[in-house]
Image (cartoon, grey):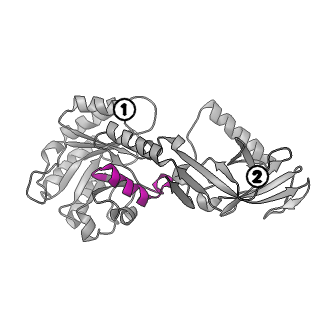
Amino acid sequence: MALTLTVDGDRWRSHLRGVADANPGLVPVVKGNGYGFTPGRLARKSEWLGVDTIAVGTYEELPGVASRFGGSLLVLTPWRPFVADLPPELAGRVIHTVGRVEDVDALLTRQPGARLVLELLTSMKRHGFTARGLWDAAEHLRRHRSARLEGVALHLPLAQGSHLGEVRRLMNDAVGAGLQHLGQPGPDGQPGRGGLDTVWVSHLTAGEQAALRTSYADFTIRPRMGTDLWLGDRAALTVTATVLDVHEVERGDSFGYRGRTVPKAGHLLVVSGGTAHGIGLEAPTGDSSIKARAATLARGGLDAVGFVRSPFSIDDKQRLFAEPPHMQASMLFLPSGARVPTVGDEIDVRVRYTATTFDRIVLS
């Protein structure tokens, strides 16, 4: 009676190992819902991969992974003065992302030996320093000699085309600001890895990483990867829902919360999976192609006559919602002539993993 994610363990683990081998310095991202797997499970799997650092999205996510992964913890959301102080046992493991000049002083005043990366403003225009801001940040860092600068961070867009030109420009900005001279010894007195010798990047291909390593041999490239790592082999993942009830209906029969009427004879199926799992909750895709626009128009036409295509499939055909999904279950309409599953059968579901919570995860 569950929305279930079934994972072909051998295939999935082989994929994870292949990605790690192809991306030296890999930093797995375990933010949010853990790409459907839960953050705790991905933290343990990162430990299995043997990486030294993982990335979380927010400070609130740290407790859920810190006990399951023993290495460093990079927080992707930039630090702000309203962030609560870290407990002593975490303070030395966390790498803060900083993207504003005023936050450099504020963080290092509260935690003088903090580990931090400086995020550069990319064409995403989300967070980060401009070239002028980097100069100012470097001046502030020189006044905090105990700070542990761990490099710079680049969060690049997903748009098609090479990012190498933009990355080279941003790296030149960082070098021009003198960040390569700001490295500090580690807490044991040994030379640290601080300063501009590490570049933390998102959304670079393996080929782009290789080109950067060739062009900037003195730098360490740390690719941060989430979707391509955990969800890169979709054939290893299967999502199913359980058929909870089946009702034969005739045209005009009333059903559901809102007393709708059945448009024609068939069956109503009640299946596991509802809004509490993320079923029926849709985020904008950003796809502006003609095909995407046509699909939007088609969905709008279905909505107008009371039909909405669901993510549930029977015999490789997506079935229609009979009404909006409930919190933990959904009602589907199956027209006459279609094969009717029985109670207890499993049917396929197409989901957006980053927005779905599963009742059960079966990992072989």
Residue ID at (58%, 46%): 284
Label 1 sits on a secondary structure element that is loop
Q: From the viewer's perspective, is 80 left or right of 105?
A: right
> Dividing the image into 4 quarters, which one contains the N terminus?
bottom right
Q: Per the image, is 43 magenta?
A: yes
Residue ID at (40%, 62%): 61
**Region rendered in magenta:** 32-53
Q: Which residue is mark 1?
A: 163
Amino acid type of the residue that numbered disc 2 sits on in the rendered structure: Pro
Classed neighbour count for the residue bearing mark 2: other residues with Cα under 10 Å, few (<14), some (14–19), many (≥20)? some
> Quadrant of residue 72 in the image?
bottom left
Label 2 sits on a secondary structure element that is loop
Residue ID at (87%, 61%): 254
Asked whether the viewer can see residue 145, the reply is: yes
Q: Per the image, is 141 magenta?
A: no
Res 341 label: 2
Q: Position of residue 314 (x, y in %)?
A: 72, 46
Q: Position of residue 307 (x, y in %)?
A: 78, 48
From the image, give the main secondary structure of the stretch colored magenta. Answer: helix
Q: Position of residue 308 (x, y in %)?
A: 74, 48
Q: From the viewer's perspective, is 309 left or right of 8?
A: right
Amino acid type of the residue that numbered disc 1 sits on in the rendered structure: His
Is 56 placed above or below 302 here?
below
Q: Nearer the viewer, residue 126 or 6?
A: 6
Classed neighbour count for the residue bearing mark 1: other residues with Cα under 10 Å, few (<14), some (14–19), many (≥20)? some
Is 277 placed above or below 127 here?
below
